[in-house]
Image (cartoon, helix red, strand yellow):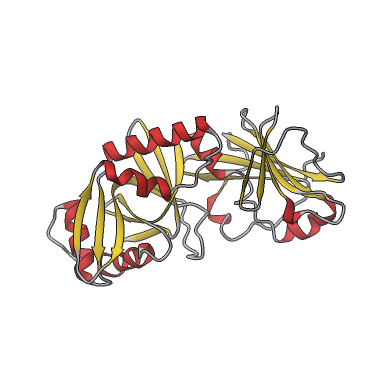
Amino acid sequence: MNTGFTFCLRFSGITVRFLLPTAIELPDNFAPFRCEDTATADEEYRVHLLTTPLRPTEPLLHREGDAHIYHTQQGWLHIYPSLSDESGCQVACLFCSDGHHTIYYPASKWEYYSKTWRCGHLICAERLLLRHDAFLLHSSLVRIHGKAVLFSGPSGAGKSTQAELWQTHLGADILNGDRTIVRWSRDGFTGSGSMWSGTSGIYRPEQAPIAAIFLPVKSTENRVERLRREAFAPLFSQTILNSWDPKYMDHAAALHAALLEQVPVYRLYCRKDREAVELAYTTVFGKEFAP
């Protein structure tokens, strides 16, 4: 296949190259993460246009939402049947261990996909990140004093609200509104903005060392409770996981265990007020609250 257009994205220090058959206009959530096209890529995705359907010979391994997952000799194949065209050609991603992956689109629909192209959910991002000791945590990310503070929990828990209160009362920068990249290195864990920002529309290609993680709970009082091992389950439940792959799960669990050893996690019973911000801030930084 001829490659007509190439671009690179960089998030959390990971560089990913995309090779497409024709030029496209990058979606808004991709543009801030674009880097020089000549950068050395850690991962590569090539778009292949299908004129005949994919027909995996391996048995179906797992269904997750709209994805049908097969473990083939080439790698993990994720097929999205609902996006197939009239001929049966599918939208799919083949994720390979050598870092050279393939995204499939029906050739008949490429004109449509090239104009509205959003492959962020098709690139098996959770597998890509884990190859680099990272994972996506359902959380809002703020940065203050050069440190990252995360608010994690299910939808409606108050993550975005607390992040916005920190912005209002402390001038904190919100780097990501919905899914933070948490990455381990020898220097510790960092939190990074990502293009997977949900409906918040907040995605900044910046990162900072994680100072603390809060699990907000709506309450009539403001109170902080330090969690130890019991923080594992609520954090793990807010992480995008491939539960059908034992090796993946072992690696992800080890990263979460290391995170709990290095980063304090608190349950934050909170109202939507300045006092909640003061309490959380002084818990982390131990300084007199200063707006």
The residue depicted at 78 percent of the width and 46 percent of the height is 21
**Residue 186 visible in this rendered orientation of the protein:** yes
Q: How many labels does the image show?
A: 0
Point out the image quarter for the C terminus: bottom left
**Residue 41 visible in this rendered orientation of the protein:** no
Q: Nearer the viewer, residue 146 or 213?
A: 213
- Position of residue 111 in the picture relative to residue 169 (left or right): right
Quarter of the image where one finds residue 253? top left
Residue 229: percent from the left, percent from the top?
27, 41
- Position of residue 271 in the picture relative to residue 127 (left or right): left
Residue 210: percent from the left, percent from the top?
31, 46
Residue 192: percent from the left, percent from the top?
42, 48
Q: Nearer the viewer, residue 96 or 78?
A: 78
Point out the image quarter for the N terminus: top right
Residue 259: percent from the left, percent from the top?
33, 39
Q: Which of 273 and 156 is in front in this view?
A: 156
The residue depicted at 62 percent of the width and 59 percent of the height is 27
Q: Which of 215 and 136 is in front in this view?
A: 215
The residue depicted at 33 percent of the width and 43 percent of the height is 232
The residue depicted at 15 percent of the width and 62 percent of the height is 289
Task: In the rendered view, tell whether residue 234 sits above or below residue 218.
Answer: above
